[in-house]
Image (tube, rainbow, N blue to C red):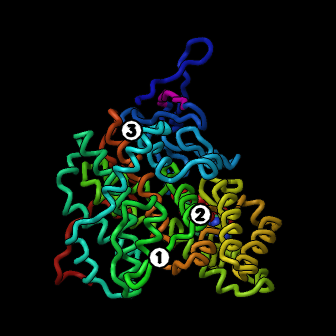
Amino acid sequence: MSQTPQTAGDGTADTVTLIDNRNGKQVTLPILHGATGPDVIDIRKLYAATGCFTYDPGFTSTGSCESAITYIDGDEGVLLHRGYPIEQLAEKSDFLEVCYLLLNGELPNPEQKAKFEQTITRHTMVHEQLANFFRGFRRDAHPMAIMCGVVGALSAFYHDSTDINDPTQRIIASHRLIAKVPTIAAMAYKYSVGQPFVYPRNDLGFAENFLHMTFAVPCEQYKVNPVIAKAMDKIFILHADHEQNASTSTVRLAGSSGANPFACIAAGIASLWGPAHGGANEAVLKMLEEIKSVDRIPEFIKRAKDKNDNFRLMGFGHRVYKNYDPRAKVMQQTCKEVLAELGIKDDPLLDIAVELERIALSDEYFIEKKLYPNVDFYSGIILKAIGFPTSMFTVLFALARTVGWISQWKEMIEDPTQKIGRPRQLYTGHVTRDFVPLNERG
Ligand code: SDX
């Protein structure tokens, strides 16, 4: 995996030279090229050579690692998983096949696919003791709070798959997480509505099984709607991985210390929960419900542009995409298919969303700042129509993203250049000063 400096046409290595104009000191740093996308300046020797750190709050210009899993071209609105465009995967693949692709690097052949599906299916049950953790939560606890707690609790159960230096244990932990997080997610929903937990069924596919565990009740037969199951599967594909976003970076940083993989995923869930990240899908629904009608849209567009108002158009904007998020396009189409399947002729929330998008995309402020709908803008409308409460939306995002987190975690552990992540800082606090005894303080 380790990159070596590339050479220009004349054989000289591509480099960049920095000159410190305080003392004329120079440092020449190699430029590394990936398969595509921006080159990187390798600054690993910078501090030793100059005594300076780089400074990049929010990592707007920083590559934290080398990865071969997901590539995003923000300007073109391109998203590739192991080279395959997200549009093609959403249209032609299924979520478990995408899980195999993210984890292993290639699409499975029929035998590999069947074996992987069987492996995941047989890991969907959770230890019976795990159900006890739910009892400690209030029934109105946010399901993401439950996910943080119960997924973290997996680290207390599966000690036969936590030796991160053993490749077999790494892949078993990966399979367990992909398989068990949906079961825990469904349990979190059941707990919140006071219904009994429903066990997974090995005769159902991934999305069908999740819908069954979530919406079936012991009193009657639950029939999964195949159109809804296909839509859920597609939504999971759209959320599977997304390069080095906040929650994935959290999982990588937690994992870089050698921490328990189950605990690292719980850390990712915590980071995803924020409204600036995966929590945006829940925030979009709340925003659309607050807007209430199409004629109030201008009032909210005005607020979104007002620097003195911390209101933001949730589901809009992205650190990387300065074009339409390709996932949002697929999501909008899926939204129309699901509403049609459910016989929902005119969903007022969809009407507001479509009109909000139309107005925003023609507004100078959004055009100049390149703010487009992102993956979270339409997902909530679909999930609400299927029957999920808004509090479950980010749980579904975490369910799907678990494969991305664990694939990135596995790639990091297997990277020979990997070290514990330990950023530095620009210190602006007090310099050394002597302690003041209590009786001498003002
Ligand atoms: C996800 O990183 C990933 O890949 C994440 C994700 C994934 O799959 O993992 O794609 C999932 O998290 C999608 C994003 C979901 N979040 C939202 O929809 C929340 C609303 N959007 C934002 O708050 C914002 O756009 C971010 C957080 C997504 C991106 O923020 P940045 O890159 O730090 O950009 P910024 O906050 O510096 O904004 C740049 C400018 C600012 O104006 P100025 O200070 O330059 O004048 O654009 C403005 C912002 O005020 N702006 C918005 C806006 N988003 C940015 N103004 C109004 N509404 C918005 N939504």
The amino acid type, in three-letter code, at marker 3 is Tyr
Q: Is residue 257 left or right of residue 117?
A: left
Q: Is residue 68 visible?
A: no
Magenta stretch mostly in which secondary structure? Answer: strand
| Residue 274 image label | none
> In the image as oriented, which residue stretches furthest toward the top?
10
Task: Tell us which disc is closer to us: 3 or 1.
Answer: 1
**Distance between mark 2 and mark 3 Cα atoms:** 50 Å
Give the image location of residue 226, x and y in percent: 57, 65
How dense is the environment of label 2, judged by Cα within 10 Å: few (below 14), some, or many (20 and up)? many
The amino acid type, in three-letter code, at marker 2 is Ala
> In the image as oriented, which residue stretches furthest toward the front?
221
Q: Residue under circle 1?
A: 222
Quadrant (top left, top right, bottom left, bottom right) of the C terminus: bottom left
Residue 265 part of the magenta segment: no
Q: Residue under circle 3?
A: 47
Give the image location of residue 223, x and y in percent: 50, 73
Secondary structure under the numbered disc 3 in the rendered image? helix
Task: Tell us which disc is closer to us: 1 or 2.
Answer: 1
Q: Nearer the viewer, residue 125 or 154?
A: 125
Mark 3 touches mark 1? (CB < 8 Å): no
200 relative to 123, above or below: below
Secondary structure under the numbered disc 1 in the rendered image? loop
Give the image location of residue 34, x and y in percent: 54, 32
Quadrant (top left, top right, bottom left, bottom right) of the N terminus: top left
Sequence-wise first label, 1 or 2: 1
Q: Residue under circle 2?
A: 231
Give the residues in magenta: 25-34
Q: Is residue 73 left or right of residue 104?
A: right
The amino acid type, in three-letter code, at marker 1 is Tyr
